[in-house]
Image (tube, helix red, strand yellow):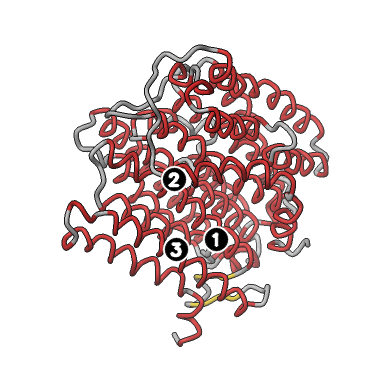
């Protein structure tokens, strides 16, 4: 190990140090000055972004591996990390108001989010099965603790237990699959696995099936989706907002690192599995979301369907498809954070606004934030000119280019079906009378962040080409 190796992992080392610092700040900062913890956490993300972007010049658009080929730094990793910082910054802006309102404003939330972010970063840059597992477990353990953070909530404790038990099963599947891969190839490095001769095709195929099942769990894809609605509903909104946004970037990276980095030659094997997962996720996710009357469960099933669309890009097995999936997951992370931000906006006096009826008449109470929520819903539904439309167009085009016309038609049909429950929220906000006259009272930074998040759905729609080009360049297809 030398200085250049440490320079490559500088963003990870910085986030690790800041996570420890934030955890210790709670011991020396008084109750009245806990806003410092929030400020330090935001500054940590800003400086991490600067370090990452400055470090991009070191690799000059090419991939660099360090620490015995276990950690890789490439354009895809840098772009995903920067979006992870931006999404987590939005989560912090929205969460502070919620944490104060519900008596949960402690350093543990910020520290756990930073440690989970570290897991995301390690996973994004993983070049070995060992690094993949370490990053995934750091992210998972932090997420379990976040869900159970409100110790007085029975629903939160139950959701955390379900999440932990099912997550442990998924980790077991992943480890078992990885052990088979190691047995078949004799290596833990993804590049060496990709180059290894197919001496044991059956063992490798079975191991790949276990790994894909574990990845489907982390994505929340059907039929490994059971934890998603229960965790989304049971966890406090601030924690649900984090789980529904930042980890999705890591789940996409997990797919790419394993399938493209280690098993590109077995594309025919894993493509059929991803097709099944995509069809089930898009179909079931959209259909079940229609009957939900709880906004958190509705967004949970919405997440399931969106992850099915991400798989449409990945299953193509080419750079164009990977870039489309990457573009989709980054856009979705921002949409999800914004949607849960509006839920926090309407939550007050210790009561979460988790019923769809809570959105009735929002236009009468706050026309601007009703417009923000409408932009987010239109974008999720894939209505032009919002960025969600271009994201869906890209992954559907990737399916068409792969010759899977029937799958593209299926995705289009269920995009129309899924638009119903998004438009229902807009109908409640604009055409129903408000059930309460409560005044919306949130800090200015919350208002500014939510406004920017909503406007980005329209702004990124007009300038989607630049982001798509960056995604293509990440896979050498620019």
Q: Quadrant of residue 283?
A: top right
Alpha carbon separation for disc pair 2 and 3: 15 Å
Name above or below for residue 354 compared with residue 312: above
**The disc label shown at residue 130, or none:** 3
Point out residue 66 in the picture as x, y percentages from the top left corner: 51, 77
Point out residue 215 in the picture as x, y percentages from the top left corner: 52, 45
Q: Are marks 2 and 3 in contact (CB under 8 Å)?
A: no
Mark 2 or mark 3, which is nearer to you?
3
Looking at the image, tell me whether mark 1 or mark 3 is earlier in sequence order.
1
Residue drawn at point x = 49 percent, y = 57 percent = 85
Mark yes or no: residue 4 visible: yes
Task: Name the quadrant of the C terminus.
Answer: bottom right
Question: Crowdedness of circle 3 by 10 Å Cα count: few (<14), some, many (20+)?
Answer: some
Mark 2 or mark 1, which is nearer to you?
1
**The disc label shown at residue 82, or none:** 1
Looking at the image, tell me whether mark 2 or mark 3 is earlier in sequence order.
3
Alpha carbon separation for disc pair 2 and 1: 30 Å
Mark yes or no: residue 186 visible: no
Name above or below for residue 236 compared with residue 364: below
Alpha carbon separation for disc pair 1 and 3: 24 Å
Q: Are marks 1 and 3 in contact (CB under 8 Å)?
A: no
């Amino acid at each position: 190990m030398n200085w250049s190796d440490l320079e490559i992992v500088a963003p990870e080392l910085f986030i690790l140090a800041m996570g420890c610092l934030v955890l210790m700040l709670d011991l020396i900062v008084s109750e009245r000055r806990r806003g410092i913890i929030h400020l330090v956490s935001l500054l940590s993300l800003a400086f991490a972004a600067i370090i990452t972007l400055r470090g991009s010049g070191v690799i000059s658009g090419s991939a660099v591996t360090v620490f015995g080929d276990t950690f890789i730094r490439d354009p895809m990793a840098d772009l995903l990390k920067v979006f992870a910082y931006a999404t987590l910054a939005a989560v912090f802006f929205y969460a502070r108001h919620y944490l104060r309102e519900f008596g949960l404003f402690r350093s543990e939330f910020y520290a756990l989010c930073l440690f989970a972010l570290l897991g995301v970063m390690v996973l994004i840059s993983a070049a070995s099965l060992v690094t993949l597992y370490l990053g995934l477990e750091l992210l998972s353990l932090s997420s379990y603790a976040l869900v159970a953070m409100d110790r007085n909530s029975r629903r939160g404790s139950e959701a955390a237990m379900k999440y932990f038990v099912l997550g442990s099963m998924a980790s077991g599947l992943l480890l078992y699959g990885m052990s088979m891969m190691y047995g078949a190839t004799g290596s833990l490095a993804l590049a060496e696995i990709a180059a290894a001769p197919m001496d044991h095709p059956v063992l490798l195929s079975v191991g790949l099936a276990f790994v894909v099942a574990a990845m489907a769990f982390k994505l929340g894809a059907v039929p490994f989706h059971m934890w998603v609605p229960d965790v989304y509903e049971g966890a406090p909104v601030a924690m649900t907002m984090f789980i529904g946004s930042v980890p999705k970037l890591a789940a996409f990276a997990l797919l790419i690192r394993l399938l493209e980095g280690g098993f590109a030659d077995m594309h025919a094997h894993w493509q059929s599995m991803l097709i099944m997962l995509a069809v089930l996720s898009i179909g079931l996710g959209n259909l079940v979301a229609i009957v939900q009357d709880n906004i958190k469960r509705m967004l949970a099933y919405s997440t399931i369907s969106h992850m099915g669309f991400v798989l449409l890009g990945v299953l193509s097995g080419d750079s164009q498809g990977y870039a489309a999936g990457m573009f989709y997951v980054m856009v979705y992370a921002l949409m999800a954070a914004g949607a849960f931000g509006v839920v926090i906006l309407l939550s007050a006096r210790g009561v979460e606004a988790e019923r769809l009826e809570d959105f009735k008449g929002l236009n009468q109470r706050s026309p601007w934030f009703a417009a923000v929520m409408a932009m987010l819903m239109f974008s999720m539904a894939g209505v032009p000119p919002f960025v969600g439309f271009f994201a869906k167009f890209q992954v559907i085009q990737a399916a068409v280019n792969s010759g899977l016309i029937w799958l593209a038609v299926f995705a289009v049909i269920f995009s129309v079906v899924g638009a119903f429950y998004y438009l229902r929220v807009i109908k409640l906000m604009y055409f129903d009378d408000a059930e309460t006259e409560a005044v919306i009272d949130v800090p200015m930074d919350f208002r500014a962040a939510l406004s920017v998040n909503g406007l980005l759905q329209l702004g990124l729609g007009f300038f989607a080409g630049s982001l798509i080009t960056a995604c293509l360049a990440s896979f050498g297809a620019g």
